[in-house]
Image (cartoon, rainbow, N blue to C red):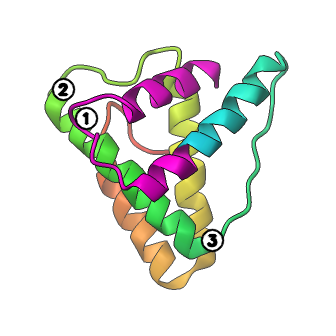
Amino acid sequence: MAAFASFARDLLHAEGPGADVPSDAVRAFDGYIDEWSALAARGDDPTWITVADPEVIEYLVYAFFRVAKEVNDEAGAAQVVPDEAAPFYWLLVGALLDALAAEGGSPAEFAAHLREFWPGELDVP
């Protein structure tokens, strides 16, 4: 979790691919990264839980997808997410898409589409 939080914050505030994240999404992402950093600092095996409107999650997941796509497209075949950050990253992506799928209707269809096309080295769990 700590490795992904560090990687995500660096990526979010860097120039280059993925840098055009809307400011409201950046603020939300920074808040989540702060939560992950605090949980990771406790040193145990934390569980992260958050509650948000499905529309907000859908918006943020799409922003997350766009960043992942831009960064992966720029990297080509190179691995983007560091090895130590990858387990949390893939769990996070899977959990976010599962949460949207659980909403049913168009959020579920959106999640299914993103799950099929999420960029990266692995298939989304």
Residue 63, how many percent across, how many down? 38, 55
Q: Residue 58, percent across and down?
A: 49, 67
User: Tag 2: residue type?
Assistant: Ala
The CA span between labels 3 and 1 is 28 Å
Q: Residue at x 77, y 18 (%)?
A: 41
Q: Amino acid at mark 1?
A: Val
The crowding category of the residue bearing disc 2, from other C-alpha atoms within 10 Å (few below 14, some 14 to 19, many at least 20), is few
User: Where does label 2 land, which residue?
Assistant: 75
Which is more foreground, mark 2 or mark 3? 2
Tell me how far mark 2 sits from mark 1, CA to CA: 6 Å
Mark 3 or mark 1, which has the lower sequence index?
1
Residue 61 x %, y %: 46, 57
- Residue 4 seen from this side: yes
Circle number at residue 18: none
Whether the residues at callouts 2 and 1 have beta carbons within 8 Å, the answer is: yes
Q: Nearer the viewer, residue 89 or 12?
A: 12
Q: Does 122 appear above or below 65?
A: above
Which mark sits nearer the N-terminus, 2 or 3? 2
- Report whether 1 appears left or right of 66: right
- Which residue has dot 3 on it? 102
Q: Which secondary structure type mostly characterizes the magenta part of the structure?
A: helix
Q: Residue 71, which numbered label? A: 1
Instruction: Tell me which segment is drawn in magenta.
Output: 1-29
Q: Residue at x 32, y 24 (%)?
A: 80
* Image quadrant containing the N terminus: top right
Mark 2–mark 3 Cα distance, whole angstroms, equals: 32 Å
